[in-house]
Image (tube, grey):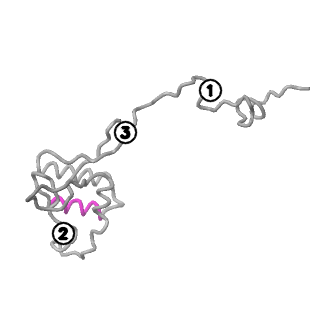
């Protein structure tokens, strides 16, 4: 009887062999942790009013690029109708379209795309505060 020297038939590389060792357990028995896990979370915008809004619009444009021009345009229009102190959006989508003279469905889905990407966060209004429930925010990674 001859011994089999090919590892693919019998030995550590054959998953049906009794000597099989998974790839990640060969050599060092403990896998390395390359980096800590992170989560993306929106952080409400703070800072100087106009320059913070300008930086927010630039960040939205870099994130969405040329493929989502309607969302970038919507974000730039939102910048005009935001409270400079609290960064709360003061116009709804329909009111914004009415003031711009556009069709009422022009901005459908743009706010949800911004919220999913972390550029809008829903924060409850304080008593007497005007506007809708959304505040401008920047997405950031937080290590766990």
- Residue 128 in the image: state x and y as whole percent: 8, 59
Residue 65 vertical placement versus 27 (above, below): below
Residue that mark 2 sits on = 96
Name the residue located 11 percent from the left edge and 50 percent from the top edge: 49
The residue carrying pointer 3 sits among few (fewer than 14), some (14 to 19) or many (20 or more) residues within 10 Å by Cα, namely: few
The residue carrying pointer 2 sits among few (fewer than 14), some (14 to 19) or many (20 or more) residues within 10 Å by Cα, namely: many
Which label was assigned to residue 38? 3
The verdict on residue 114 being magenta is no
- Residue 29 in the image: state x and y as whole percent: 57, 24
Q: CA distance from mark 2 to mark 3?
A: 36 Å
- Residue 82 in the image: state x and y as whole percent: 14, 58
Sequence order check: which comes first, mark 3 or mark 1? 1
2 vs 3, front mark: 3
Q: Magenta span covers which residues?
A: 70-80
Q: Is residue 73 left or right of residue 22?
A: left
User: Residue farthest to the front?
Assistant: 127
Q: CA distance from mark 3 to mark 1?
A: 28 Å
Q: Is residue 110 left or right of residue 26?
A: left
Q: Tag 1's secondary structure?
A: loop
Residue that mark 1 sits on = 26
């Amino acid at each position: 009887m001859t011994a089999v020297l090919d590892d693919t038939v019998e030995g550590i590389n054959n998953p049906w062999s009794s000597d099989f060792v998974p790839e990640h357990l060969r050599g060092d028995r403990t896998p390395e942790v390359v980096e800590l896990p992170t989560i993306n979370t929106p952080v409400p915008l703070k800072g100087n009013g106009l320059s913070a809004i300008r930086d927010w619009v630039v960040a939205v444009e870099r994130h969405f690029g040329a493929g989502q021009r309607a969302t970038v345009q919507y974000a730039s229009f939102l910048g005009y109708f935001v409270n400079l102190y609290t960064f709360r959006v003061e116009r709804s989508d329909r009111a914004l379209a009415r003031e711009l003279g556009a069709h009422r469905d022009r901005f459908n889905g743009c706010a949800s795309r911004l919220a999913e990407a972390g550029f809008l966060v829903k924060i409850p209004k304080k008593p007497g505060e005007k506007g809708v429930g959304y505040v401008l925010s920047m997405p950031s990674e937080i290590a766990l």
